[in-house]
Amino acid sequence: MFTKTFAPLLLPLLLSLAQWSGASTPRAIVYTSCVVPRTAALTFDDGPYIYMTTISDLLTSKGAKGTFFTETTVGLSQAASNAESLPDDCIYGSKTVARLQHAYGQGHQIASHTWSHPNLDDLNATQITEEFMRIDVALKKILGIQTSFLRPPYGNYNNQVREVAYQLNKTLVTWDFDSQDSLGATPQQSESYYDQAIASSVKTLLALNHETINTTAETLAGYAIDKLQGAGYTLVTVAECLELPPYTVVGTPGQRDETWVCSKKGDKGKRED
């Protein structure tokens, strides 16, 4: 079990959380927009999914950088009818690992979207800590990195979430622009939202997109890149648009072993919704 394996790490953290109270409690910073003028950060949530490489290559081909907020469960529901994805739907699956390493190798930022995409407002400190640490462990094994940034699922967080994030040296990031691709918007509607933002001469843009949406990978991402660059924005990572380091640790990926599984019970590593 994860909590048994990481009990020596969790106990000091949880004891410190239990001792905090009042306005003096340290809490992680939450960013909702970029700070560097004329920058745009395109972000893609809910991967690593089968479209990650398509988006990564598209960004690279256009001289742009992007940020991928990764987790382990949402893509499975989209993959249910896709035979290519089903055998490899765990973040530790060989194809998924290859996608992550490819995007990271191209210089795009990899960040955390928690382990299982819960509403963090509904969790206690122990559960929040596990959500943060478990995805961190996976990315450390796969890429050799410790991420600085975490996007809370649904953009939901409370003071307890910020307190745990602070103790784990995380910066929280939401967004100031939503393409609404995951809410049923057509590509044309999402394109119009980008057009409206550009027409309003926003100084910066921190855009929410989802890499699990095929039309985002095939149509919307390219449109957004071209329009933003054409309007004079520089497309950078979230870390770059905030002038902060993307990772607290940059090292060497681990070697695959029996711990590279998604299930706590050590099954075949299949993600569970």
Image: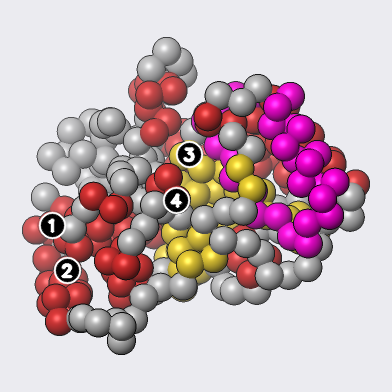
**Tags 1 and 2 in contact by the CB under 8 Å rule?**
yes
Q: Looking at the image, which residue is at 80% across and 39% down?
A: 195
Q: Looking at the image, which residue is at 90% across and 46% down?
A: 230
Residue range highlighted in magenta = 188-215
Q: Looking at the image, which residue is at 68% across and 70% down?
A: 35
Q: Nearer the viewer, mark 4 or mark 3?
A: 4
Q: Looking at the image, which residue is at 36% across and 76% down?
A: 27
Q: Is residue 7 above or below residue 58?
A: below
* 189 in the magenta segment: yes
Indicate the secondary structure of the residue bearing disc 3: strand
Q: Which residue is mark 2?
A: 10
Badge 2: residue crowd in 10 Å (few <14, some 14–19, many ≥20): some
Q: Earlier in the sequence, mark 1 or mark 4?
A: 1
Residue 144 x, y percent position in the rendering? 44, 61
Q: Residue 40 is drawn in which quadrant?
A: bottom right
Q: Amino acid at mark 2?
A: Leu
Q: Nearer the viewer, mark 4 or mark 2?
A: 4
Q: Is residue 67 above or below residue 213?
A: below
Q: Amino acid at mark 4?
A: Gly
Is residue 176 shown left or right of residue 212? right
Q: Which residue is mark 3?
A: 47
